[in-house]
Image (cartoon, grey):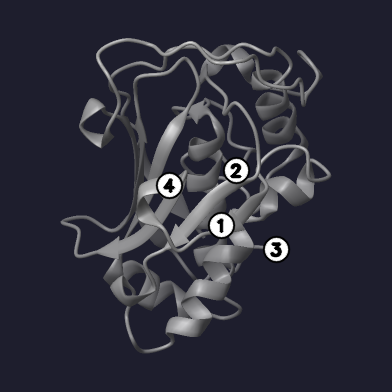
Amino acid sequence: MRRNATLLATLLVTTLVAGSCGGSAGPTALEPGPILGDCLIEPHYVGQVVLNRWRSFPLRTLFLEDSFPAENRARILALIEDGIEAWAEGTGGRIGSVTPTSVDATADLVIEARELEQAGAFTTHGTGTPYLARARIVFDRETVARLAQMDDGALLSALAAHEMGHVLGIIGHPQREDVLMFELGPLRPTPADLNTIGHAYCTSKGHLAPQTGRGATREVS
C-alpha cells in the first residue's frame, strides 16, 4: 500500500505484559499447542524481539463498540477489523484468526477506546500460563477519530495491524525500517513480519512472557 507523503501521524505504541490483566501466581499446565509456522524462514527479525504464542486459534474477540467515538463509528470499527484480520490473511488463516464474542469473561482479546494521555494505542497480555492469554488493545479515542477521516483510512488499519502483531506474540519492535512492526514502517504485514510470527508458532510450547516490555513512538506517513 502506497504511503501518502502529505500525512503524518505520530502514534505511541506500547506493549505491556502485565499481571494486572489477570492470571495466577504460577504457570498452568496445558496441552501443547499445534505447530502453525516454520522456523527461521528468511527474511525475519527473530533475534530482535521477544516472541511468544497463543495455544490455539481463533481468538474470541470482543469489541467494546460503545467506547469508540459515535461519529464515524461504523467506519472506525471496520478499519480496525481490517487491520486485525491482516495477519490471518497473510498466513493463510493459520495464525491470527478471530471469532466474535459478546462475553467479556471468556474473551481472549478485548478491543476498546479510551481517552489516553498520548496518541496511538497500546496492547496488554495477561499472565499465568506459558502461552499468551487475555489480550487487550486500547486505542486513543481522538487518534481513531482523526485517522478514520484521512483518505482511505489506511493509517488506522495499519495501527490496528501493528497492535495485532503484538497481540499474536511479537513483543517489542525490530530495528529494521522495512517491516510493519518497526516504529515507522509499512502499512501491512511484510514477509519478514509473517516469517517472524511464524517462528513463534513453529514449536508447540509457549514461553512465559516478560512481566513488562515497552514500545516506542511509531510514526506512519
Q: Residues within 10 Å of mark 2 (few under 14, many from 20)?
A: many
Q: Amino acid at mark 1?
A: Ala
Which circle, 3 or 1, is nearer the viewer? Answer: 1
Q: Amino acid at mark 3?
A: Arg
Q: Residue 2 — which label? A: 3
Q: Amino acid at mark 2?
A: Leu
Q: Quadrant of residue 85?
A: bottom right
Q: Is residue 21 left or right of residue 151?
A: left
Which of pointers 1 and 2 lies earlier in the amino acid sequence?
Answer: 1
Image height check: is 192 above or below 107?
above
Q: Residue 106 — which label? A: 4
Residue at disc 2, secondary structure: loop
At 54% from the left and 15% from the top, the residue drawn is: 30
Q: Amino acid at mark 4?
A: Thr
Expressed as whole percent of the image width and height from the top left, the position of residue 214 reads 31, 29
Which of pointers 4 and 2 lies earlier in the amino acid sequence?
Answer: 4
Q: Residue 158 — which label? A: 1
Q: CA distance from mark 1 to mark 4?
A: 27 Å
Q: How many marks?
A: 4
Which circle, 3 or 2, is nearer the viewer? Answer: 2
